[in-house]
Image (cartoon, rainbow, N blue to C red):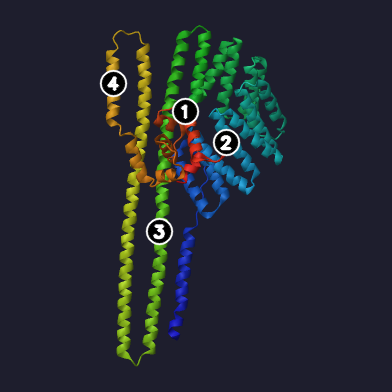
Amino acid sequence: MKQFFTYIPLLLFLFLFATGAFAQRGQSSYSVLTRESMRQNPDLAFKQLKRNLNNALEEGNDHVAAVCYRQIGELYHYQAAYLQALDNFYKAESLFRKQEQTLELANTWIKIGETNFYNRQYTVSLEAFEQSLSLYISVNNNDGMADALAHIGQVYEKTENLQEAKRYQYLALDHLGGIADQALIAKIYENIGSIYEDKFQLDSALLFFQKALDIIDQQDDKMAKIEVFNNLGDVFRKTGDYQTALKYTRQATSLAKDMQEHYQLASSYRDLAKTFSLMGRYDSAYHYSYAGREIHTEIFSEDMTKQLTVLQTLFELEQKDDAIVQYERERKIHYTMLLFGTAIVLLLIFLGISVISRQKLKITNGKRLYTQNQILYETQKRAMETDLHNKKLREENLKNELELKSKELTSHTLHLIQKNQLLDELKEKLNVVVKSDKRDQRKELRHIINLIQLNHNQDKNWDDFRIVFERVHEHFFDGLRAHSDGLTSSDFRLAALLKMNLGSPDISTMLGISQDSLRIARYRLRKKLNLPEGESLTTFIQRF
């Protein structure tokens, strides 16, 4: 029996080694991403941010998780996926509020306000900027207060309340000291210049635009310089100094081309067209007007491609993350079972050895007992190895099946989006044909009918989409029915698209309805689901 106790330290060592292995797997690192890298390679940035976020959530690091949520929101904002951007910003806001990190919280409210501002939700945007302002005031942060006040002024300018817009911009200037952020001062000067331009006080507008340009020249901020050059061109055009207007607008055009800033380039082309038109040079005006429209078409196509790419990447990552989490959970269980099974087998062996040492005089019985224990050990070992092999095969099959279903669902979704975009295109072509003065329109109509027939032959309809969706998200519709028995087929379609984290533009395209109709549909669905005010519909749908 004494020999048996001599092996106990060995068992303890095995358990400590296994525990240390688990602890090492829990260690992780976080990669820092810059805004430039997020803009240049959004797919790679998104994958890295998701890895950082998953590591932070697993370790319970709320601060890093909040930063990741905010950066993911910025990434969606750059891709004009404003709904997804807001969802992540609000998650970051909740975590920063929980940690009482006031400056981070105020900065996040600025991001929320900017997203709503670009989405033309000016009332919501104003509330977000005012919330940020109150947080900056609570910690007496002058630069932050100036930033929030400048944003509030921009909202008032957009809503044509120029008096309030000017008041808030001057308040922003008052909060900036001598060592303040020069880029922020330049932006405020530019905002004030825009207000004076809207009020047609062109001398004052020119003064503030020139102040902004002087600061920007010192910092060599090319993006800001493009905006100021365009503004200066507008002012000189409105004063009738067309040559000076052309000089500044062409400088903006040159910088926009060098930086491949298509939005700014389109704006510059539009301003050039206006100036040449006022000069009576209509050929040049038409040339730049047409070039501006061409760039807008390219921008729309690129934005749609980027959004679809990011949405597809998001969907694939979520499916893979779910599969990996499930696999890791089962692997840990299997590892634990194997560990304890091995310990039990070792205990049995040690017990057999101790019995043999105590029964030296009973050689025959001892050999028989040892043989039985050996057979038991081999049998259990083979059984565990067989069971582990079978489980690995099942896991591999499940993983392959999940990837196949995910790809099939993504294909259905993209096809439905393309189908509805085609129908919109056909609608525009029909309107052109109806308004045309051509006598014989049969050829155009026959071409449109052929397009409709081709799309009809390829359409697998919503029933196919629902079948594929239920393979990936089992019991989703059953869960919704259990929560509310008043849901219609339209409600289930909307809920399925929300479950896939699609943005409002894609959802409205797939359902064939306008953005206003989509908001009404979302409101009705909230009512049917009895959601309390303030709770996110998208977050609620993700729980099923």
Residue found at x 39% / y 81%:
351
Vertical comparison of 443 with 80: above or below:
above
Cβ atoms at labels 1 and 2 below 8 Å apart: no
Q: Amino acid at mark 2?
A: Ile
Cβ atoms at labels 4 and 1 below 8 Å apart: no
Q: Which residue is mark 2?
A: 112
- Residue 29 visible? The answer is no
Q: Earlier in the sequence, mark 4 or mark 1?
A: 4
Q: Position of residue 460 (x, y in %)?
A: 30, 34
Residue found at x 29% / y 89%:
364
Residue found at x 50% / y 51%:
55
Bin the neighbour count of mark 3 within 10 Å (Cα to Cα): few under 14, some 14-19, many 20 and up.
some
Q: Position of residue 397 (x, y in %)?
A: 31, 53
Q: CA distance from mark 2 to mark 4?
A: 45 Å
Question: Which mark lies nearer to you, 4 or 1?
Answer: 1
Check disc 2 and report its element: helix, strand or loop: helix
Q: CA distance from mark 1 to mark 2?
A: 24 Å
Q: CA distance from mark 4 to mark 3?
A: 54 Å
Q: Which residue is mark 1?
A: 517
Q: Residue furthest front?
A: 485
Check disc 1 and report its element: helix, strand or loop: helix
Q: Amino acid at mark 4?
A: Ile
For residue 449, which numbered disc appears in the image?
4
Q: Residue furthest top?
A: 280
